[in-house]
Every structure is written in structure tokens, then in C-alpha cells.
Image (cartoon, rainbow, N blue to C red):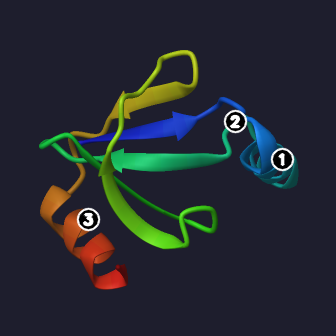
Amino acid sequence: MKIAFYKGTRSGVAGIYNRVVRGFDKGRYSHCELIFSDGVSASASFMDKGVRFKHIVFDDANWDIIDIPWADEKAARNWFTLKE
């Protein structure tokens, strides 16, 4: 399993949201995605109106991705499914 941190800035309203979140958090990322071993990504956000699962093509220019081999993938997927 991996986690992807979004460092890009989208256009339009989504870009304003990216900047506001980074400014509020005083960080370089506006959100993150959990990437399961089957390639499905999961996140929960205001912009997506809650929890969602989807396939994403991650562009290295916009994302920092790290492996989290110690994570319990089954428990993480169950948590997202319960919140869906």
C-alpha cells in the first residue's frame, strides 16, 4: 500500500481550495490519497463530497508518493468502506 500527497494546484475553484488548505495547514500538500495494492485509490474530501474510491493516474509533478508496507490494507479499506 502507498500514500500519495498532492502538491499541485488545479485550475479554478479546486485550485483556490488547494491553496487555502495548504495555507491553513502551513504545509506543502492540500490532500492525500491512499493507494491500495490493486491500484484503487481512496480519499475523503469536501471537494469529492465525502469518501470515494477511484483509479488515478499519478503525475510525479503533482504528487509525492511513499510506500507504507507496515500499513494494514484490509483495515484501511474497511474503514473507507464504512465511511462511504
Q: Residue at x 75, y 35 (%)?
A: 11
Residue situated furthest bottom in the rendering: 82
Residues packed near mark 2 inside 10 Å, few (<14), some (14 to 19) or many (20 plus): few
Identify which residue, 57 or 78, lies in the foreground: 57
- In the picture of the structure, the residue carrying the numbered disc 2 is 10
- In the picture of the structure, the residue carrying the numbered disc 3 is 76
Q: Looking at the rendering, in which quadrant would you find the N terminus?
A: top left
Local secondary structure at mark 2: loop
Q: Is residue 50 above or below residue 61?
A: below
Give the number of the mark in front: 3 or 2. Answer: 2
Q: Earlier in the sequence, mark 3 or mark 2?
A: 2
Which residue type carries mark 2? Answer: Arg
Local secondary structure at mark 3: helix
Q: Position of residue 27 (x, y in %)?
A: 76, 41
Q: Earlier in the sequence, mark 1 or mark 3?
A: 1
Q: Position of residue 20 (x, y in %)?
A: 85, 51
Marks 1 and 3 in Cβ contact (< 8 Å): no
Q: Looking at the rendering, in which quadrant would you find the C terminus?
A: bottom left
Q: Position of residue 35 (x, y in %)?
A: 29, 44
Q: Residue at x 48, y 17 (%)?
A: 60
Q: Position of residue 26 (x, y in %)?
A: 83, 45
Q: Is residue 7 above or below residue 53?
A: above
Which residue type carries mark 1? Answer: Ile
